[in-house]
Image: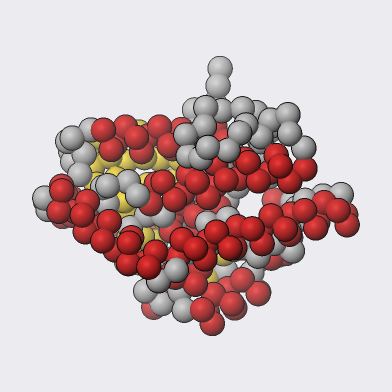
Amino acid sequence: MAEETVRYERRGPVAVVTMDRPDYRNAQNSAMTYALDAAFYRAADDDEVKVVVLAGAGPHFSAGHDIGTPGRDADQSFDRRASLWWDHVGKSGGESRYARESEVYLGMCRRWRELPKPMIAMVQGACVAGGLMLAWCCDLIVASEDAFFADPVVRMGIPGVEYFAHPWVMPPRVAREFLYTGDRMPAARARELGWVNRVVPRDDLEAETLGLAERIAAMPRFGLALTKKAINQAEDLMGMRAGMDSAFGLHHLAHAHNAEVGGDSLGGQTAKSMAEGGK
């Protein structure tokens, strides 16, 4: 039986989409990515849903991309919907990786950012690397006091995750420190910088997030959709989309360099070594 990686629940006008791999800190394999995609399509198609909440089961929101669990499935084919690149399976080297990551990482997150209903990330514990991508493509972030954020992939010799929103989410000098050190940023600091909306006690996280979602849901659906589009367009006019395209190319140059000089596109890093390097 296939692993169930995502749960979908309607709570009045709010759809709660929950990543459900708590034993692996909700590491994102392709099965989860495509299950999230299906859940967001479902929420978009449901006229009763006004707001979407993205959550992670267990103590952590998401530890990022799956680079080492038994459910890792980067070698498998899925029905592609986010990009027009060919299937990565059966290809080699950069051709395979670029095709896959154009679809499941950059392409998916960009499309989810365009979901015409407000999305709120409900974050507790770790929100690391690929977890940042999921939170950042949401409109709002509500975090528990114990939440922390990190993008440690520079340890791999790679300039940040594929959905490179860092210089738009936070001031560029802060983004530099965030990436150069790979250190964890506590939720309180992220709120000071304006990229987390609210920080609440862990026990209040769900109630606070759903209360905010319900308040937003009282607004006109089309007005919310147009407002979201207006803000997204403003970000793109400030260079966000073009900047991500540039960073995505550098990201894959780094993968190719690692593979050429060391035979490992991840620079010898594992999920354990990445987690142990943070502070």
- Residue depicted at x 15% and y 47%: 221
39 vs 117: above or below: above
- Residue depicted at x 71% and y 42%: 95
Q: In which quarter of the image is residue 215?
A: bottom left
Residue 17: x and y in percent read 36, 40
Residue 192: x and y in percent read 39, 78
- Residue depicted at x 51% and y 40%: 83
Q: Nearer the viewer, residue 144 or 171?
A: 171
In the image, is 177 to the left or to the right of 139? right
Quarter of the figure that contains the C terminus: bottom right
Residue 128: x and y in percent read 56, 57
Q: In which quarter of the image is residue 150?
A: bottom right
Residue 10 visible in the displayed image: yes
* Render colour scheme: secondary structure
- Residue depicted at x 27% and y 47%: 116
In the image, is 63 to the left or to the right of 207? right
Quarter of the figure that contains the N terminus: top right
Q: In which quarter of the image is residue 216?
A: bottom left
Q: Which of 201 and 173 is in front in this view?
A: 173
Residue placed furthest toward the bottom: 173
Q: Looking at the image, how many numbered discs can be counted on the residues? A: 0
91 vs 115: above or below: above
Residue placed furthest toward the top: 1
Residue 33 visible in the displayed image: no
134 vs 195: above or below: above
158 vs 95: above or below: below
In the image, is 219 to the left or to the right of 209? left
Q: Nearer the viewer, residue 42 or 71?
A: 42
In the image, is 117 to the left or to the right of 84? left
Residue 269: x and y in percent read 76, 55
